[in-house]
Image (cartoon, coloured by chain):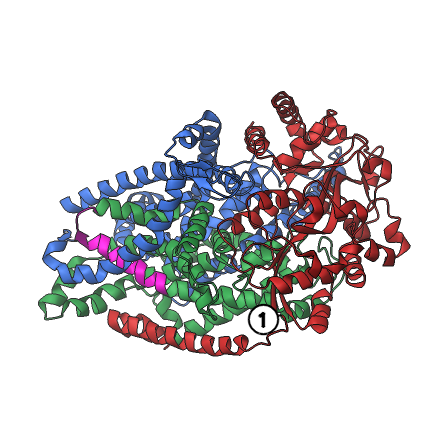
Amino acid sequence: MTGPLQDWKGQRRPFAAIASLPVFWLALFFVAPMTIVWLYSFGQNAGPADIDISGTLDNYKRATEWLYLSIFLKSLAVAALTTLICLIVGFPIAMAITFAAPRWRPWLLLGIMLPFWTNLLIRTYALMALMGTNGYMNKGLGGLWEGASWLRTLVGMQPLEAWTPVQLLYNNFAVVLGLVYVHLPFMVLPLYSALDRMDKSLIEASLDLGAGHFKTFMKIVVPLAAPGIVAGVMITLIPALGAYLTPDLMGGTESQMIANVIERQFKRANDWPFGAALSFLLIYAMFILIALQSMRTNKSMERG
Amino acid sequence: MDFKTFLHAGSNRRAMLKGMGVAAVGFSLTGALAGCGEKDAAKLANGEEAKLNFYNWDTYIGETTLEDYMDKAGVDVNMTLFASNDELFAKLRAGNQGYDVIVPSNDFVERMAAADMLTELDKAQIPNFKNVAPDYQDVPYDPARKFSMPYTWLALGIGYRKSKVKSVPDSWKVLFDSDEYKGRIAVLSEAGDMFRLYGKYIGKSVNGLTDADLKTIEAMMIKQKPNIKSFHEDNGQDLLLKGEVDVVLEYNGDIAQAMVEDPDIGFVIPKEGSQLNSDNLCIPKGAPHPKNAHAFINYLLDAEAGKKITETILYPTPNDAAKALMPAEYKNNAVIFPPADILAKCEYAKFNPELQPKYEEAFTRVRAA
Amino acid sequence: MMFNRTAIAPLEYTRKLWMRSWVALTLLFLYAPLIVLMIFSFNDSKRNVVWKGFTVKYYEKALNNDSLVEAMVNSLTIAFLATIVSLVIGALAAVMLWRFRFPFKGLVEGTMSLPIIVPEICLGVAFLIFFAKVDWPTDLPWPLNLSAITIAHITFCFPFVAMVVRARLASFNKEEEEAAKDLGATEWQAFRDVLLPHIKPALIAGALLAFTLSLDDFVITFFTSGPDTITFPVKVYSMVRFSVTPEVNAASTILILLTVILTFIALKLQGVKGIAETH
């Protein structure tokens, strides 16, 4: 597919031209600020607004207690579920855009992106208005229920019992729905980007040779779209893990995610060192995963 | 430079950078021109620019207060908004980004004073201090009013929907210890306030909780959690109005505003007593216009200006002169001004740096349970 | 059109009914809250909980609200600048990682994905402290005073762009580039005329992503903004503390319309088809 990687030494000028800006920006505007916070994670509060960097590991010890680990695992589960739903819903959308007539393609793409240019907070409140106890979703469901009940009386059966609104909000269901709502385009875009480049004749060939649509899909389309799927999963899972506004607004009393806890340390608890320690534990874990994955990719690219 | 050129021909890196450079220069020129206009704004007699940066809660000012002040003093007040004390504190912790007047609550006045983040007020520049009610001229969280002037005061209590409750919920038991309104309860998500109010429920003072008390309260909270629908972030009155919940832990001012929209809403301070809060005007260290700041605070304490503010926000006011100008329905409103016998049982929360982290950790445990 | 209207070819998935229904349902799910939002911006009620009557007074209020308009302008400006710079840095980063082998590559790659992983509040606090410690000037004229926020936005946007571009690069056939060079093209010409057109769909996707992320960002912007540099999400967040008034809905509707119009203009200049063409 792609050629072997070039060694930078053989191409110093192009390498310098390409690499200098990203690396410089990363170093100055990301590594430097994060280093300060990383140092804080080894410190403790010395008064309401000062931090004394004493090299202590207390914050990390506290961050690895079961209380916080359990919250982290729960957040991971919620984020994974969100990503899975986004993948299942988003893949057909990406395919629809790819196979649409060229005339329609940009409009579909735009159509998917447009809701996400609305402010997240407003969108969430609008979604909550729909999902509330007296919101339109419940009203709609109530209407259907009453309608079914009336139909039953028509045919002589007992009517259904009175409609009580379903609790669609302030629980884990609402959090997952809200997260899917926010992260769907982040899944669709990379999928589309990868599917777009796929050689369509391979699908035609597979269908010609007698494989059904589903088999073609699983054996040809999915493997070819794999880099897009991986990108999409990464772009969805990780922000979903760090989401705090949606669980905060739409969640119930048992929907506490790790980002909410971290936020609380930086704000209410005014315990920046501990918040830093929690954040960095999260970061270390993800960093290791990604580094492993990229080392694997690099090795396979070097071979191929 | 249109999109097409940018993406295709402009892909030569040098050309792209050149293009961006031109755009950047163009931007800064127009910005500089606009900036020039601003900087030539009038200098006041006190030597400062005719500008003020006011960092306030939303809808916490009269409809015309800022325009009135512009007419009176010729100072352009730029009001930006924050949504919670923690945000205010977190932002100002690292340094003042240009705010002149801020509005922290009482416990944060203590905290910020302890962290050396506030300027001492020069009372000579605030003659309207005499309008402040005697109770508020000297308070436990700011003795002799060194750093703050009172803006409003509030009390926590129970807001409820009259048609949905069996009787007036005049005890914290309804929110904290009973499943009578299972699934129709909302309480605050602020750990400190929650623990302190539970303390009131079990008969202690808000500032006198021991570690053993914390354990007891934590267990009670976990037991009550299945009955609670939501830990709201100060939008309890909305939940009540929308019909999501029937009883809610909220501030009297918020519920008073809600009662205007919906007469089926009521408010009561439970018989065990409650917590008092007060929002105050302060000047953070490093404010660029301290003299303007003093003059503005003085203006807010004026009787007429105070009256206009109170008409809009309907919160209890510590400004006696303004209160005198308000209509009778306001002065006699039992929700806004609770009866004295109940008020006697209400206390201010003291900022306690040792207990606060314990509250937070315990509350995290409650939420994870 | 090669296929006549009555028969659906095997590859024309989009014409199949189930596919169309799926897309329609998803679009309904995505747009329903927005439509509710727009309808309620005409609601004649301060608290906007129940429908009380039709009015356009909140649009007047929103347009006359100087700070709200300023916030919208700031948000759009920052998003625009951040998108352009993120595209450049992200594309360069993707090419760098895809093409070269160099020491510490794994480390650089990992670090580049970090802005996506770091919890926003942590990144926000990091920027707050960083800009305070380097004494970043706070009284620059517009738009330079947006520089702190823009830098922060670029930093967390470009890794997303890099990721999307990399996914696209994975399918690039290096031989095309070799062939161009064999035929006498310089390094730059090969880059510009062979590689760049290939990654164009990814650049468009990346630009859309970066623009969205920047326009909507609240947490990081909150910590890097000052009294003169309010952005729309920050302003809205502080306004909804009491309740969501129709004014906020009206302002959001205006922002959506503005963004749509700007996009249409960009599309017209670019040529609508160009956005999604395949090679």
Whether residue B140 is visible: yes
Q: Which residue is mark 1?
A: B49
Q: What color does chain C have in the rendering?
A: green
* In this view, B28 is above or below A147: below
Q: A263 and A162: which one is in front?
A: A263
Judged left or right of residue B335, residue C117 is: left
Judged left or right of residue A297, residue A149 is: right
Chain of the residue that carries numbered disc 1 in the rendered image: B
Q: B75 and C55: which one is in front?
A: B75
**Which chain: red?**
B
Whether residue A107 is visible: no
* In this view, B66 is above or below B281: below
- Residue at 59% x, 57% y: name it: C236
Q: Quadrant of residue A60?
A: top left
Circle 1: residue type:
Glu
- Residue at 31% x, 50% y: name it: C112
The x, y position of residue B17, in whole percent, is 29, 71
Magenta segment boundaries in residue numbering: C85-104
Q: A240 and B44: which one is in front?
A: B44
Which quadrant is home to the N terminus of chain C?
Answer: bottom left
The x, y position of residue C61, in whole percent, is 68, 68
Seen as rendered, the residue at the extreme right is: B328
* In this view, A23 is above or below B22: above
Which quadrant is home to the C terminus of chain C?
Answer: bottom left
Principal secondary structure, stretch drawn in magenta: helix
Magenta stretch encompasses residue A125: no
Judged left or right of residue A198, residue C24 is: right
The x, y position of residue A143, in whole percent, is 70, 45
* In this view, C235 is above or below A227: below
Question: Badge 1 local density, few (<14 within 10 Å), some, or many (20+)?
Answer: some
Q: What color does chain A have in the rendering?
A: blue
